[in-house]
Image: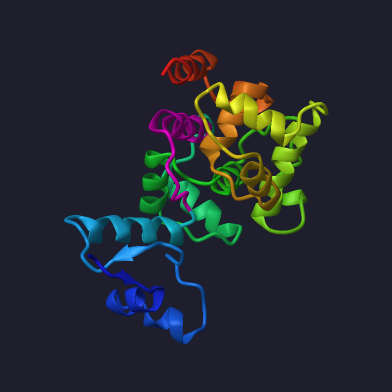
């Protein structure tokens, strides 16, 4: 039977001893890793670690919804005539270091967090939904700004709580526990894809601003009927 590596053993094997020496949580803490790893295991773990370090979602995101998140950001950038190189420079001006290549990869995958979506919109000078306060006017971290934007959308429907929102997401085949959903919103760490899933079932203003509704409905119906 394959043995289970502790986090410290794994970090030493992959040359990440610095995490241990510094007394920090490792980027993959909490994963159970077999010493007899299957073929392709190394690539999978490195990909997971890279995504974690770059601020992308490591949980599974439906490819169709990831594509919609990608499409929303690409449309916003095209509308403002902002290339990936331009966006990289503009992000640097607000203290965010992202290379054009890194941005292109994130946009292509569509698995980026909502914070990155908000950063890109802010840097590009894109229009924002009327319910949101312009990010630069909100004190605190980008996670706090993301949480504020989501809560502002929810506030337009005061009867809607995370329990009801979780049940509505179930209609799209999206399974998120109420506690998990509430925690992600409060901490501002939800993915852009999850935001647009919520926007779809609640008809947030951002849906009309960044996406073609017919494309959203097509994805929603295909997931509902699976």
Q: Quadrant of residue 149?
A: top right
Quarter of the picture holding the N terminus: bottom left
Q: Main secondary structure of the magenta part?
A: helix
What residue sits 67% from the left and 30% below the top?
165
How is the model colour-coded?
Answer: rainbow
Question: Residue 104 in the image: x percent, y percent?
Answer: 38, 45
Count of all numbered marks drawn on residues in the image: 0
Vertical arrangement, residue 218 with respect to residue 61, above or below? above
Question: Residue 108 in the image: x percent, y percent?
Answer: 37, 39
Q: Residue furthest right?
A: 158
Q: Is residue 160 left or right of residue 96?
A: right
Q: Nearer the viewer, residue 146 or 86?
A: 146
Q: Nearer the viewer, residue 146 or 154?
A: 154
Quarter of the picture holding the C terminus: top left
Residue 165 lies within the magenta run: no
Q: Is residue 91 left or right of residue 111?
A: right
What residue sits 59% from the left and 41% below the top?
121
What residue sits 41% from the left and 55% below the top?
51
What residue sits 65% from the left and 54% below the top?
142
Q: Quadrant of residue 28?
A: bottom left
Q: Is residue 125 left or right of residue 218?
A: right
Question: Residue 97 in the image: x percent, y percent?
Answer: 50, 61
Q: Residue furthest left?
A: 39
Residue 66 lies within the magenta run: yes
Q: Residue furthest bottom?
A: 21
Vertical arrangement, residue 38 with respect to residue 68, above or below? below
Question: Residue 159 in the image: x percent, y percent?
Answer: 81, 26
Query: Which residues are drawn in magenta?
Result: 56-78
């Amino acid at each position: 039977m394959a043995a289970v590596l502790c986090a410290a053993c794994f970090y030493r094997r992959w040359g990440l001893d610095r995490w241990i020496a510094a007394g920090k949580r490792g980027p993959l803490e909490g994963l159970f890793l077999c010493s007899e790893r299957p073929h392709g295991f190394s690539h999978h773990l490195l990909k997971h670690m890279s995504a974690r370090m770059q601020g992308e979602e490591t949980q599974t995101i439906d490819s169709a919804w990831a594509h919609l998140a990608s499409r929303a950001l690409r449309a916003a950038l095209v509308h403002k005539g902002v290339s990936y190189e331009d966006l990289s420079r503009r992000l640097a001006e607000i203290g965010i270091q992202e290379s054009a290549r890194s941005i292109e990869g994130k946009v292509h995958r569509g698995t980026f967090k909502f914070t990155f979506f908000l950063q890109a919109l802010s840097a590009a000078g894109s229009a924002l939904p009327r319910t949101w306060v312009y990010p630069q006017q909100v004190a605190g971290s980008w996670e706090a700004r993301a949480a504020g934007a989501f809560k502002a959308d929810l506030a337009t429907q005061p009867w809607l709580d995370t329990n009801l929102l979780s049940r509505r997401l179930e209609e799209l085949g999206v399974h998120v526990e109420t506690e998990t959903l509430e925690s992600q919103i409060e901490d501002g760490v939800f993915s852009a894809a999850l935001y647009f899933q919520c926007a779809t079932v609640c008809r947030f203003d951002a849906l009309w601003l960044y996406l073609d509704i017919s494309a959203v409905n097509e994805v929603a119906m295909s997931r509902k009927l699976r």
